[in-house]
Amino acid sequence: MRNELKNARRIVIKIGTSTLLYDNGTVNLRLIDELAFTITNLMNEGVEVILVTSGAIGVAMGQLRLKTRPREVERQQALAAIGQAELMNIYKQRFNAYTQHVAQVLLTRDVVDYETSRENVSNTLNALLDLGVLAIINENDTVSIDELDHNTAFGDNDTLSVIVSIVANADLLIILSDVDGFYDKNPGDFADAKKYDKITEITPELLNQAGGAGTNVGTGGMLSKLTAAETLLKNDGKLVIALGEDPKIINEILSGENVGTLFAKG
């Protein structure tokens, strides 16, 4: 049992594109409905929750029936604008069914680089939590590109979720992924792959065991998750990477069950 997780009262949940969408690019409405139910129930119990979501570009690709993610920056920006509107519409509809109010928050890396921006975001998140409103956060992909004069891009939402956790002083970050934890080798290729139950330090060996990006619609992979975990560990945070196909796993994590991989010092 992971008793240290039972007392988590402010949590950040990050869900990735590959979890939100089916392989054919359509939205997994069942999963979003179950996620909305689970989060609403937690908030009814008094747990403070912030949701970091990917999927804007993937949702737009499904809408426009695009098979591959375009390489042109301006097309990715356009898809992000199209998909973000649809994604928030779906979230709002499903959370409304459980009488949970939501708010959209789009961030750029300014929240890290500039103290005033960081304070403004912190104040906004705290105010939303005080109001009992769920903040649904994504990166502002229409402006967050490397070609701008200053670095505004997080690069992926694993990094974004860590920054949000730090800014919000969250007790725990849960990353819902398409894998059930971190393994010493790819479990899809090796039957003897072993899952880590707990990791206290990100070593070069662990980084070498991580692969690249996951799917053709997402930007993250296990390497980005380890890099994100390294940042969180340096800030004395806690992270669980777990399989997101059934959002009720969030309840298991908060009950201290040994699911997924826990990243925590000590």
Image: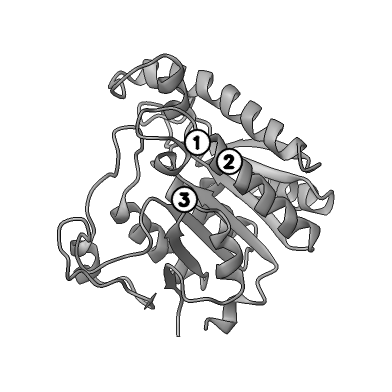
Q: Mark 2, residues whose alpha carbon is within 10 Å: few (<14), some, or many (≥20)?
A: many
Q: Are marks 1 and 2 in contact (CB under 8 Å)?
A: yes
x 46%, y 21%: residue: 60
Residue at the spot x=76%, y=37% of the render?
A: 97
Query: Alpha-carbon neighbours of circle 3 within 10 Å: few (<14), some, or many (≥20)?
Result: many
Residue at 58% across / 41% down in the picture? 32
The answer to whether residue 228 is left or right of residue 171 is left
The three-letter code of the residue at mark 1 reads Asn
Question: Which residue position holds label 1?
Answer: 28
Q: Is residue 109 left or right of residue 199?
A: right
Tell me which amino acid carries mark 3: Glu
The residue that disc 2 covers is 32
Circle on res. 198: none
| Residue 220 position in % (x across, y down) | 35, 45
Looking at the image, is 241 positioned above or below residue 158?
A: below
Residue 190, how many percent across, how many down? 15, 63
Is residue 77 at all visible to an observer of this figure? no
Seen from the viewer's position, the closer of residues 23 and 150 is 23
Spatial CA distance of label 3 from label 1 is 10 Å
Q: How has the structure been colored for display?
A: one colour
Residue under the point 74% across and 49% down: 123
Name the quadrant containing residue 185: bottom left
Q: Secondary structure at mark 2?
A: helix
Q: Secondary structure at mark 3?
A: loop
